[in-house]
Image (cartoon, rainbow, N blue to C red):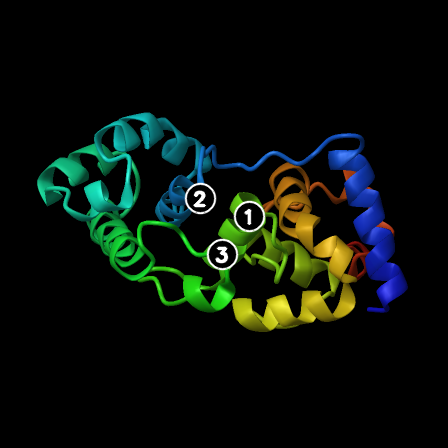
Amino acid sequence: MKREDACAIYRALATEYAAGKEPRPFIHFENPFQSLILTILSAQTTDRAVNEIKETLFSRYPTPEALASAERQDLERILRRIGLYRTKAKNITSAAAAVAEEFGGRVPSTMEELLTIPGVGRKTANIVQNHAFGIHEGIAVDTHVTRVSRRLGLTDHTDADRIERDLMAIFPHECWKMINYLFILHGRSICKARNPACERCIIRARCRYFRETRGA
């Protein structure tokens, strides 16, 4: 796909989903530490489920030091309503310990440092950088971004890192801040995994999936 087509897609989605308003993070947080922990917890579960345990979790463990020393059974009890809660309890304890011990209790803002924290990959690091620090060093690639990007023809890859590189190559840097947000909203409302609503899609004329499956 040509950059001019990618930019036209971006403009159409931005007008549809974000015209005149600043995008609000799907996960509700109050500081970088909460952003980091909640983003780790959001893997393979809904943002709503994560937001629902936020108050209980951080009222008990408000700092990296407190969370790092949390009793595993108590932490698992708090996390029980979200998926893979035992593994996630271990992951966020390790992440909190790294923040406390390696970074003096302050979540780092650079990609290089974030990637040293247990349980943090590029997707999580991009989300924390974007939402907590206003840094747009890359594009967070989740299942919605993967699906929308592949259907549009922006990438042919399935690996998140390769998809991110393709998106960064075709979209200007000033678009990176919003790509994840716009593709998630479009993926949830129109470009669903099953039965995508192509007839209501505002970018179907530029979509490879629509051309190939609907004979357009």
Name the quadrant of the C terminus: bottom right
Amino acid type, mark 2: Pro
Task: Please provide percent x and percent y for residue 27.
Answer: 48, 37
Do the residues bearing badges 2 and 3 touch, measured as CB atoms within 8 Å?
A: yes
Do the residues bearing badges 1 and 3 touch, measured as CB atoms within 8 Å?
A: yes
Q: Secondary structure at mark 2?
A: helix
User: Alpha-carbon neighbours of circle 2 within 10 Å: few (<14), some, or many (≥20)?
Assistant: some
Nearer the observer, 156 or 172: 172
Amino acid type, mark 3: Ser
| Number of residue marks | 3
Q: Quadrant of residue 164?
A: bottom right
Q: Which residue is mark 1?
A: 133
Q: What residue lies at 26% left-to-right and 27% top-to-bottom?
A: 59
Horizontally, residue 174 falls left or right of residue 82, namely: right
Q: What residue lies at 34% left-to-right and 31% top-to-bottom?
A: 54
Q: Residue furthest right?
A: 4
Amino acid type, mark 1: Phe
Report how far apart the C-alphas of labels 2 and 3 lie in the structure: 9 Å
Tag of residue 109: 3
User: Alpha-carbon neighbours of circle 3 within 10 Å: few (<14), some, or many (≥20)?
Assistant: some
Do the residues bearing badges 2 and 1 touch, measured as CB atoms within 8 Å?
A: yes
Report how far apart the C-alphas of labels 2 and 1 lie in the structure: 8 Å
Sequence-wise, which precedes: disc 1 or disc 3? Answer: 3
Q: Residue furthest front?
A: 104
Quick check: can you spot residue 216? no
Task: Please provide percent x and percent y for residue 24.
Answer: 61, 34
Looking at the image, residue 207 lies above or below residue 45: below
Horizontally, residue 153 falls left or right of residue 118, namely: right
Q: Which residue is mark 2?
A: 32
Q: What residue lies at 43% left-to-right and 65% top-to-bottom?
A: 113
Name the quadrant of the N terminus: bottom right
